[in-house]
Amino acid sequence: MNIKDEQAHEMARELAALTGETMTKAVKIAIEERLARCQKPKRKSRGIADKLNRLAEYCASLPEYDDRTDDEIIGYDENGLPS
């Protein structure tokens, strides 16, 4: 491989110096790591959203043991003022 971009060449040289690897090995490992990240399914945010949706569904399915209105529970009167 012939790197024609001077900045990319310098970064590869610096990476090789920091890791004690040859430039070829440092570049190969860097490419392998980036490929692995790019090929990994993007599920983090979806996973959190799915968990929150399941939690909301679970909470909605729970029985209500209190027959007071929401305003009565938090202490507001019919005018929306604290009672």
Image (cartoon, rainbow, N blue to C red):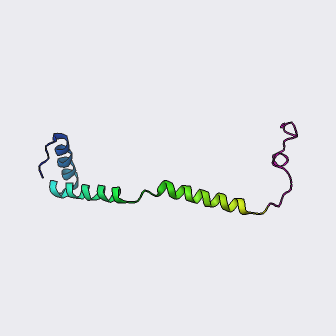
The image quarter containing residue 55 is bottom right
Count up the numbered dots: 0
Name the residue at 20% across, 54% down: 27
Where does residue 47 sit, x and y in percent of width and height? 51, 59
Q: Is residue 32 magenta?
A: no
**Magenta stretch secondary structure, dominant:** loop
Q: Is residue 40 visible?
A: yes
Where does residue 20 sit, x and y in percent of width and height? 19, 56
Where does residue 51 sit, x and y in percent of width and height? 57, 59
The image quarter containing residue 39 is bottom left
Instruction: Give the vertical position of 28 relative to 73 (above or below).
Output: below
Q: Is residue 79 magenta?
A: yes
Taking the image as shown, residue 66 lies to the left or right of residue 42, namely right
Of the 4 image quadrants, the one containing the C terminus is top right
Pick whichever, 40 or 76, lies toward us: 40
Instruction: Give the vertical position of 82 relative to 69 (above or below).
Output: above
Q: Is residue 22 visible?
A: no
Where does residue 54 sit, x and y in percent of width and height? 61, 61
**From which residue to which does the magenta span run?**
64-83
Name the residue at 16% across, 41% down: 5
Name the residue at 88% across, 39% down: 78
Taking the image as shown, residue 76 lies to the left or right of residue 11, namely right
Pick whichever, 22 or 27, lies toward us: 27
Name the residue at 84% across, 39% down: 82
The image quarter containing residue 59 is bottom right
